[in-house]
Amino acid sequence: MKKITTAAAAFALLAGLTGCGLFPAPTPLPDIAPATPVSVLPPECPFVAGVYLTPVRIPLGTPRETIGSVLNAYSGWLNAGSELVTSWSPGTAVPETCVEQLAARNAEAYARTIFTTHSDVAWQEYFASVKAMNQQNLETVRLAVPESGGRGTFELLQEVDSSATDSGTFLKFDAVYRPAAAGQGNWEDLDKPTRWYVELVPSGEFLVINHIETKPAAGYP
């Protein structure tokens, strides 16, 4: 999540978010029903069949409201599944393989719900990095690490430059991720002040991310 690894992605965002993202602006998608992917958890994993993740989506709103919704969606993704791990047989660790598979299921559900580019191979490394962060949180919950519930949160530091039109919303803001256990885990530098560049397009009553990039934000302690 630290950055998109393709040169085209960096060039497009640093050029000023003029609307030309890594991919051509798509035709607005129809409204997407809450994702209910078929569970990929093996049968030995202790989760009830039919209990599926409903990803946190990004509703239409003002640019500032959309910033909050983007951070809320990412917080939801990084914490996705923690309640399932917590509620299963308290005091007994969930098998590690189940945590890995649950994080994979979460990544698929979120990528295809809040991104226009969910199936493009150029974005798979990015989705994998967010999956890894989700898996770290799930592992913390699985092991019942003291003083940590595995639920980190994002904090908005400042809105830098944002705009919205009928065809898209463009956001530039600074934020920081606050892990449940500070100093533990690899958060792709999101636990330090980070500058976000986000391009979203409408999809029914919601917005979906067409392009995103993050880099270190200057001017913070």
Image: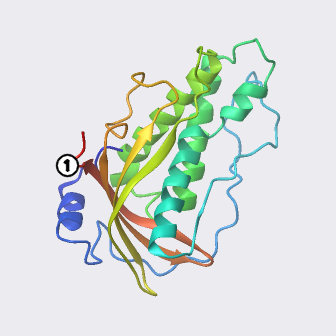
Using residue 173 as the reference point, say whether residue 52 is left or right of it: right
* Colour approach in the figure: rainbow
Q: Is residue 4 visible?
A: no
- Foreground residue, 51 or 79? 79
Mark 1, Cα crowd under 10 Å, few <14 / some 14-19 / many 20+, is few
Work out which residue is located at the far front of the displayed protein and give it.
Answer: 221
How many numbered dots are placed on residues in this image?
A: 1
Using residue 28 as the reference point, say whether residue 221 is left or right of it: left
- Foreground residue, 83 or 24? 83
Q: Which residue is mark 1?
A: 218
Q: Is residue 104 visible?
A: yes
Q: Where is residue 60 shown, x and y percent of the image?
A: 56, 75
Which amino acid is tagged 1? Ala
Q: Where is residue 208 shown, x and y percent of the image?
A: 50, 67
Residue at 58% x, 28% y: name it: 150
Q: Splitting the image into 4 quarters, where does residue 205 fall?
A: bottom right
Residue at 79% x, 24% y: name it: 88
Q: Secondary structure at mark 1?
A: loop
Locate the C terminus by quadrant.
top left
- Foreground residue, 72 or 88? 72
Residue at 24% x, 60% y: name it: 9
Work out which residue is located at the far bottom of the displayed protein and give it.
Answer: 166
Locate the N terminus by quadrant.
top left
Q: Where is residue 142 shown, x and y percent of the image?
A: 64, 20
Q: Splitting the image into 4 quarters, where does residue 188 fall?
A: top left
Q: Where is residue 125 shown, x and y percent of the image?
A: 36, 43
- Foreground residue, 213 or 106? 213
